[in-house]
Amino acid sequence: MRQMRIPAVFMRGGTSKAIVFHQRDLPADRREWDAIFLAAIGSPDANGRQLDGLGGGISSLSKVCVVGPPSRPDADIDYTFAQVSVKDATVDYSGNCGNMSSAMGPFALDEGLIQATGGATSVRIHNTNTNKIIVSRFAVDDGLAAVDGDFALPGVAGHGAPIRLEFLDPGGAGTGKLLPTGNAVDRLDVPGLGIIQVSMVDAANACAFVRAGDLGLTGTEMPGALDADTALLDKLDRIRRTASVAMGIAASFEAAKSRVSSPKIGFVSPPQAAKTLAGEALAPSAMDLTARMISVGQPHRAVPLTAALCIAVAARVAGTLVNQAASGVRPEADIRIAQPSGLTVVAAHVRQENTGWRADHAVVYRTARRLMDGTVYVSAAKVVPGHVRQAAE
């Protein structure tokens, strides 16, 4: 059977990579997107390698982005994010990817969706997953997004042109509330585990945080060690699924099993000596807290950007477990998060109102680069014929 051809761009955004499609090249019926995305990425793959697609075998390399015209007047483009499971036939649209958000402005400029004059531009991105606006600011080189620069991003080799991402009003991205339960800390009764303290915060993406010590961990464990500890990963997923119900994301513990990317689950600890994946030593004085994040059942090599934003916001909310871990942070200082690939620095402005806590904005810098463009081939047997524009002869 012939293969189907779909125009696409392959991009790195921050510490993630994704296939980026124009919305115009996909079926109007979004129920048909899943089969295309799964086939293009190479899922499901019980071997966990995605050799029959463009995925890389881990969650940060198993992503799809769709860009189209804006559906609201305060945006320049719409951007929809899809997290594709590696081993399961699941595509999750419940949250955004902050890392890939950094690639959307450059994609829009390079594809002619927006115009820029001068040496810099800004793009107002409407993320349809969270219904939030992200303002992307970056340099322009001869009419295209600049690539070369001196900004080093932990987890990415070399240097690149910095992209400033401003997440406006990030609170309640998935649940409608910065603190979905109204509490800075909750005691959750987790099936098979019992009572455990959890801070559930929704900023940029919904996240659930626990203390590393409550899991019998130091907080500086490396992704490889976490990945090999199947009992720990099962424990974390049970906490995640219980938190999902408490946050109103899933209707039941069982239903939360299929909502794989939201909430993200992580554990935090106070500043302490640690090492990066590259062997670099991090001193306690260089950080405000340590964090490890897991999404889609896999430990991240670098903290996901939306999780970093959520951590920074949570660090400003009095009483959260994140706030307790970062107890020494100055009120107006950036939040320095120690994670396996180094330090992630996030600026966050949070204030308390009569109605509760509000996050005005969070700011972070990333780099992005177009890696390849052309045509993605997917097996016609895996998608509904006639819904992509052209079949390969």
Image (spheres, grey):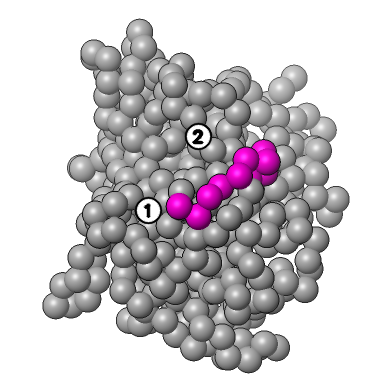
Percent coordinates x, y for residue 301 in the rendering: 64, 48
Would residue 100 be found to the left or right of residue 134 on screen? right
Residue drawn at 25 percent across, 46 percent down? 72
Q: In the image, what residue type sits under mark 2?
A: Leu
Circle 1 residue: 335
The image shows residue 283, relative to residue 215, as above or below, that is: above
Q: Residue at x 50, y 71 (%)?
A: 208
Q: Which mark is residue 153?
A: 2
Amino acid tagged 1: Ile
Specify the farthest residue to the left.
354
Residue 34 visible in rendering: no
What stretch of residues is rendered in magenta? 276-285
Density class for disc 1 (Cα within 10 Å; few <14, some 14-19, many ≥20) is many
Tell me where residue 361 appears, x and y as whole percent: 26, 52
Q: In the rendering, at what x and y percent does residue 218 appear? A: 64, 67
- Residue 204 on the magenta segment: no
Can residue 297 be seen at all in this image of the molecule?
yes
Where 100 falls versus 220 (above or below)?
above
Label of residue 389 in the image: none
Q: For numbered disc 1, what is the local secondary structure?
A: strand
Q: Please, what secondary structure does the residue beneath circle 2 have?
A: loop
Quadrant assignment, res 183: bottom left
Of pointers 1 and 2, the one earlier in the residue sequence: 2
In the image, 2 versus 302, the foreground residue is 302
Residue at mark 1 to residue at mark 2: CA–CA distance: 16 Å
Within 10 Å of the Cα at label 2, are there few (<14), some (14-19), or many (20+) other Cα atoms? many
